[in-house]
Amino acid sequence: MIEPFLIRAIIAGIGVAIIAGAVGCFVVWRKMAYFGDSLAHSALLGVALGLVMGISTNIGTIIICSTFAIILIWLQQKKFLATDTLLGILAHSALSVGMVVLSLLERSIDLHSYLFGDILAVNLLEIYFIIFGGSFVLLFLYFNWASFVLMTIDEKLARAEGINVFVNQLLIMLIMTVVVAVSFKIVGLLLITSLLIIPAASARQLASSPELMAIISSGLAVLAVIIGIFSSLHLDTPSGPSIVVASALIFVTISLFSFILRKNN
């Protein structure tokens, strides 16, 4: 008989993997890996905000990450500094402030679970949040897929078609904040970006269309989560890093397979 905690972990992991795989395609296409990493770093301040205010850490993360994205876009429009410089300043400042606030709290904080995840300890409330947040992300992607893809392929063509590129860029960033908020319990704040990038990078070598790439990416992310959960359980290793290692091994396997096919052809 499968233990209840393992069932919860599998459900939560699959939910996160599906949305991370789909959103990760845009992270890869639009070269937003550094933004995703910076967003995840800033999320620790959201965790601190949630604990200080006595609200869900997921809600605190959404508030801080959304604010992070809006401030970044505003500063980009002002052409104050280069984007990578702005990301570095905002992300590491938010991470440091979050660490300081958490250290000042007069309670025991399991910082390791926030940084590297603990999927085996996920509870029902967190599963509900993943299901609700994941459904929102998938529906949003479904209704805006064509606009997002066209904007990614050619921004000038998208503008000619009447698409508001600025608004759509903001929407993609805000979707990523939701992914970060629902994912940090699974793989941790420091490893979230890997769950966005690696399955999408693997799927890119197999897919012949954007839609197929999103489907394959989600499938590979689900596979990595399941392998990671059971390897973590049986080898007594951290769950978040175990999932990322599984994802990396899948990427290496697909890359070798693709290389051999290209060489034979």
Image: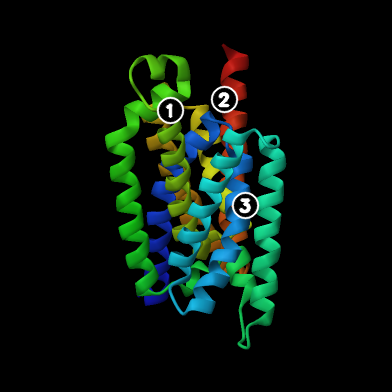
- Residue 173 image point, x, y percent: 48, 43
- Give the CA separation, mark 2 to mark 1: 34 Å
Amino acid carrying mark 3 in the image: Val
**Contact, CB < 8 Å: mark 3 with mark 1?**
no
Q: Local crowd at mark 1 within 10 Å, few (<14), some, or many (≥20)?
A: some
Find disc 2 in the rendering and name its residue.
Answer: 258
Find disc 1 in the rendering and name its residue.
Answer: 165
Q: Local crowd at mark 3 within 10 Å, few (<14), some, or many (≥20)?
A: some
The image shows residue 231, relative to residue 25, as above or below, that is below
Find disc 3 in the rendering and name its residue.
Answer: 245
Observer able to see residue 221: yes
Given residues 222 and 26, the one toward you in this image is 26
* Label 3: element kind: helix
The image shows residue 140, relative to residue 256, as above or below, that is below
- Residue 113 image point, x, y percent: 59, 71
The image shows residue 115, relative to residue 40, as above or below, that is below
Tell which circle, 2 or 3, labels the residue nearer the N-terminal end: 3
Q: Residue at x 56, y 56 (%)?
A: 243
Observer able to see residue 3: no
Image quadrant in which you'd find residue 92? bottom right
Amino acid carrying mark 2 in the image: Ser
